[in-house]
Amino acid sequence: MNEKEVIASIALTQVLGVGLISARMLINGAGSAEKVFACRKELSEIIPGVTPKIAELLDCPQAFARAEAEYAFAQKNRINCICYNDEAYPSRLRECPDAPVILFFKGEADLNALRVINMVGTRNATDYGQRICRDFITDLKSLCPDVLVVSGLAYGIDIHSHRAAVSNGLTTVGVLAHGLDRIYPAAHRKTAIDMLANGGLLTEFMSETNPDRQNFVKRNRIVAGMSDATIVVESAVKGGALITADIAQSYHRDCFAFPGRVNDEFSVGCNNLIKDNKAGLILSAEDFIKSMCWDANPDAVPVAIQRQLFVDLSEEEQLIVDILREKGDSQINSLVVEADMPVNKINAILFELEMKGVVRALAGGMFQLL
């Protein structure tokens, strides 16, 4: 991404009165953040719904001054500025209506890895929760070695998930609620540095941004949005992990939880998620991989299923077929978004289509029209 586009994207986030959704609408309508500013006086003619007031707001030299300073900081500290239309931008996150206009990333991870999960939970992780993190990540490494593990670098389940990933050689990314000029909490600095070699640190916040309370909820939507699935390890009846799970559901992403004893304070949240059918119950990495259909061998010769010549499809089955015909091979998460159906219903439809010889399951939760 060129320097002018990066600076314009940063500047757009600094214009008072222009929120995330409006900024994305402007970028999509004009074609780039740079063109949003260059054509600000004509935007009302180019983009429906844009008022002359927007043009006035975009006349904001101080926003560009701040953006130029931030770009200089990023260059000096080898931080990648990833614009919304950049190929390196997490494609799963781009699907979300409140995705950031720009991200700041330091590290080596592929944010568009084939498989991405996040592990979240209480800051007061018990020995039980810590053991789940270690065992799950260790088994995940042997069963699914190319997975990217995302979390929030916070105390408790977050940091234990990151550390387990680092010790097992899995790529792991920490999403921060502040700028990349600091690490919060400071006690996790060593782990954060270890993560840079095989993973990294990601944020939407510029330098000099404090880790204020409201920033953590914003951080959680990135954790949920860039992942295929959210895994809650331990949670009290309330907490940030449950917010992440709710956000994941709103994005039509899979959500799983490890159960705990009914009287344990930090198992109540997970048990409630399972009881209320908001999360699938898992006991191991093997459970999770089977639920995600990640256990298919990509090198295996697929079993041929004879397709019926004149197959009768329901209206919903036909919708899925039409989407696959238009989009090509698709992950189940993409089908959930395109069809606007819950994941359990999509799973049932895909099963019926497989039995009819219309689609075939591929590795990584992908489905192919035959």
Image: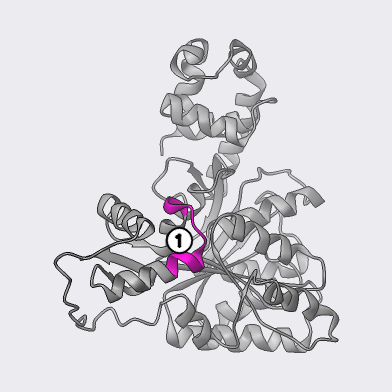
| Residue shown at 44% from the left, 16% from the top | 46
247 or 358: which is nearer to us?
Answer: 358
**Toward the viewer: 193 or 275?**
275
Find the magenta span and give its range. Answer: 337-347
Q: Is residue 345 magenta?
A: yes
Q: Which residue is mark 1?
A: 333
Q: Residue at x 19, y 78 (%)?
A: 305
What residue lies at 56% left-to-right and 37% top-to-bottom? 71
Quadrant in which residue 200 is drawn: bottom right
**Residue located 43% across and 53% down the image:** 339
Q: Is residue 179 above or below residue 344?
A: above
Q: Is residue 23 visible?
A: yes
Q: Position of residue 256 (x, y in %)?
A: 60, 74
Total count of labels:
1
219 and 234: which one is in front?
A: 234
Quick one: 147 or 240, which is closer to the camera? 240
- Residue type at numbered disc 1: Asn
Q: Quadrant of the N terminus?
A: top left
State the image quarter where residue 174 is shown.
bottom right
Image quadrant occupied by the C terminus: bottom left
Vertical arrangement, residue 172 with respect to residue 184, above or below:
below
Query: In the image, 245: left or right of 196?
Result: right
Q: Is residue 156 something one can see in this rendering?
A: no
Residue 305 among magenta residues: no
Q: Is residue 97 toward the left or the right of residue 331 in the image?
A: right
Q: How is the rendered protein coloured?
A: one colour
Q: Is residue 240 above or below residue 35?
A: below
Magenta stretch secondary structure, dominant: helix
Residue 108: x, y in percent? Answer: 47, 62
Q: Is residue 73 left or right of residue 145?
A: right
In this rendering, the answer to whether 83 lies above or below 266 is: above
